[in-house]
Image (cartoon, rainbow, N blue to C red):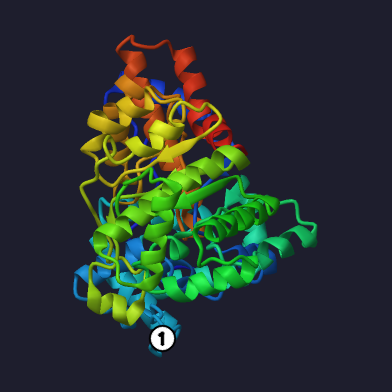
Amino acid sequence: MNATGRPLHLHQDRLFPSDPTQRAIARRLYAQVAELPIVSPHGHTDPSWFAGNATFANATELLLVPDHYVFRMLYSQGIGLDALGIPHADGSRAQVDPRHAWRVFAENFHLFRGTPSSLWLNHVFHEVFGLRVRLDAGTADHYYDTITEALQTEGFRPRALFERFRIEVIATTEGPLDPLAHHQAIRDSGWNGKVVTAYRPDEVVDPEHESFAEALQRFGHVTGEDVHGWDGYLRAHRNRRAFFKSMGATSTDHGHESALTTNLSHAEAGRLFAKILKGGFSREEAALFRGQVLTEMAGMSLDDGLVMQLHPGCYRNHNPLLFARHGRNVGADLPLATDYVHALKPLLDRFGNEPDFRLILFTLDESTYSRELGPMAGHYPCLYLGPAWWFHDSPEGMWRFREQTLSTAGFYNTVGFNDDTRAFLSIPARHDVARRIDCAVLAKLVAEHRMDEDEAAEVAVDLAYTLPKRAYKL
């Protein structure tokens, strides 16, 4: 199938320095990491894809509907989510022809110029589907037909793509009530692809979560514990953590509005929990409860060895109209200023000096890199820095992360890269961007005689492959 249009080309030196000396060094470093296997230790792909190995439906369902980076930008330009076929909160959706939704996307693809989404999507179009013309209104149908037809073939089933992408291991993220049936099905299938889970207990930790009361009831039913008492509640978490670990989990994940932790006595924590259960709590008390649970989770991680991740500093569901209509994770979340030095002190007072405890910190507040996060990770044995996250998962964001944390945390108090995505086909593109930027950063250090090139090559391999495996115990 042929189509005319402006050519789509991926330059071999994309994201490398314009300085010829640095660019040459970056090329040599990149050549040593470009083909390394992908370790994806934290993300949100759907395990049912790998369990059932069914074909993906069409271009829209795979590349547009799950990608909040994409429909967030379109919504900002006045394009309603119903026009794109984005599901409603109750699981229903407007009756939209997926081809029509794709045409809307294609007509507006120019909005993504210069953004990370354009880097990722053009990589997918060029490398995964072999497209050689740019996406626009004139090539929309060519794209839709090429991609959709390819998706119906054996080579584009989830497991085949997993292997084609050289993914060594990928971690999904499940809530505490998930039976992990898809992970069990993957095990039972005999397929060699490594897909592990991660424990994300937010819905039974956050009293302000809209499903908290119902989820807590189910939490008790699933675990057989009396979760209306503080001790039973904690036992229920230990129960589920053990189950998740038995299904391959090596980490937990916690998405809180702040990094606040508390260190209440057992009696104080019990009284606070009792008040939470009655429902008459304040916002401050809800925050205290979340903070206490984080500290309890740190203690459990020290016991069971699961790596703890903290993703704070996000104002979730900022747009109430969008939240009411489409629910969570539809691109209406916003970064918040976040304190770490004071907020984490109660937890660190208890566990900060434990070399067997591992806490990986992320931020949406870049002002904390050099002021707080770098110095903290450069001191406490338990702390590691996750990569530039979400709004900062961009070439510029990755540069800023390295520049502002290198002097205090170095490279080896960071954990390499994780893609943290629902967009499965973008995973190779995202890892490629991270590898190119890290090679560019290292090339600058070599050119300035701050590091020898053989050292830089070792660091490049560690950032791309060794550190994420080590940090996440994979």
Q: How many marks?
A: 1
Q: Position of residue 88 (x, y in %)?
A: 38, 82
Q: Is residue 192 above or below residue 453?
A: below
Q: Quadrant of the C terminus?
A: top right
Q: Position of residue 214 (x, y in %)?
A: 47, 76
Of 404 and 152, which appears nearest the observer?
404
Is 322 positioned to the left or the right of 204 in the image? left
Q: Which residue is mark 1?
A: 93
For this orientation, the residue located farthest to the front is: 267
Observer able to see residue 287: yes
Please tell me which residue is depicted at 42% across the width and 84% down the height of the picture: 90
For this orientation, the residue located farthest to the bottom is: 95
Is 458 positioned to the left or the right of 76 in the image? right
Q: Position of residue 433 (x, y in %)?
A: 41, 41
Is 409 positioned to the left or the right of 421 in the image? left
Give the amino acid at mark 1. Arg
Please tell me which residue is depicted at 35% across the width and 41% down the height of the picture: 388
Observer able to see residue 133: no
Mark 1: which secondary structure? loop
Please tell me which residue is depicted at 28% across the width and 47% down the height of the picture: 364
Q: Position of residue 16 (x, y in %)?
A: 34, 32
Q: Is residue 221 above or below residue 254?
A: below
Of 220 and 82, which appears nearest the observer?
220
Instruction: Please identify the quarter of the rendering in which residue 315 is found.
Output: bottom left
Neighbour tally class for label 1: few under 14, some 14-19, many 20 plus, Cα within 10 Å: some
Q: Is residue 9 above or below residue 190?
A: above
Instruction: Please identify the quarter of the rendering in which residue 304 is found.
Output: top right
